[in-house]
Image (cartoon, rainbow, N blue to C red):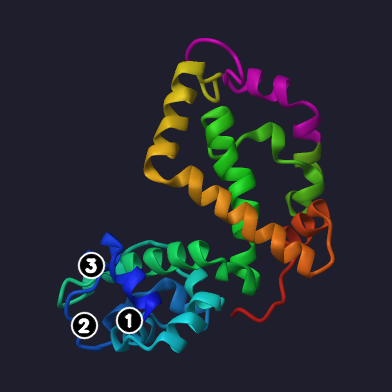
Amino acid sequence: MGRLYDKLSADVRYREGLRACIHCGTCTAICPAAEFYNYDPRKIVNIVQNKDEDRIEDLLKSETIWYCGECMSCVTRCPRDNAPGLVIIALRSLSQDEGYFTESEKGRQQLALKRTIGEWILKYGYCVYPRHLSFELHPEAGPVWKWEQENLDDVFERLGGNLDGKGPGILRKIPDESLDELKRIFDLTGATERFEKIEKASAEKAAEMGLEDSEYFVKIYNENSGEHS
């Protein structure tokens, strides 16, 4: 087969997620993303089943594979026990491996996710860390969040949290040994290597667009063409 299809079919999520699609469209009918986006999981499955290299490459460079919310509603309804959601995960991984994700607006946002959620997990043990949810990057939160950010320690104390504190409590400081274990998990599962690929491809795209790293990050963080629904 072609290079891209061979790499895709080697992914266990693809092998487990696609058995014998009969193109009934049940996955699309139940899909929440399909209600709001130009997104059709049945068509995606059809493309990969046809093993057409050009169409697979187009898919990897497209916005389409980033619309799925991974709710896995498709799995619960498929009469042949397929899991289009798993196929999407495999396609996303391949897009990142090949650097194709930088060719779409939603794909480029992988860098923002890596530098926020991904790095916060490794550094703090949490996918959402309130000290870094800056008002400047989240103006939609309004002035209340600006005030809360300026008074974060007092707010958490009043609410009974333990922000960055020792011992139990909400958003307590995670021990270094636990963070070291998280890092080893990322290293052994390939997540660290995946992060490096995202950074490398994103740096190349930023250079192609004539942007400094910080400019590129702000652009992809805020960019929304409004053409996705």
Measured in 3D between alpha carbons, the distance from the residue under mark 2 to the one under mark 3, in whole angstroms, is 13 Å
Q: Is residue 140 left or right of residue 182?
A: right
Judging from the image, what secondary structure is the residue with disc 1 in?
helix
> At x 66% / y 34%, what residue is drawn?
130
Q: Looking at this view, is 37 or 117 the one in front?
A: 117
Disc 1 target residue: 45
Q: Residue 15, which numbered label? A: 3
> At x 61% / y 21%, what residue is drawn?
163
Q: Marks 2 and 1: CB-CB under 8 Å? A: yes
Measured in 3D between alpha carbons, the distance from the residue under mark 2 to the one under mark 1, in whole angstroms, is 8 Å
**Quarter of the picture holding the C terminus:** bottom right
Q: Which residues are magenta?
A: 147-168
- Relative image position of residue 8 (x, y in whole percent): 35, 70
* Amino acid under disc 2: Cys
- Relative image position of residue 108 (x, y in whole percent): 64, 64
**Quarter of the picture holding the N terminus:** bottom left
* Amino acid under disc 3: Arg
Q: Marks 3 and 1: CB-CB under 8 Å? A: no
- Relative image position of residue 30 (x, y in whole percent): 33, 76
Measured in 3D between alpha carbons, the distance from the residue under mark 3 to the one under mark 1, in whole angstroms, is 12 Å
- Relative image position of residue 66 (x, y in whole percent): 51, 69
Of mark 2 and mark 1, the one earlier in the sequence is: 2
Of mark 3 and mark 1, the one earlier in the sequence is: 3
Disc 2 target residue: 21
Q: Can residue 9 be spotted in the picture?
A: yes
> At x 51% / y 20%, what residue is drawn?
174
Of mark 2 and mark 3, the one earlier in the sequence is: 3
Judging from the image, what secondary structure is the residue with disc 2 in?
loop
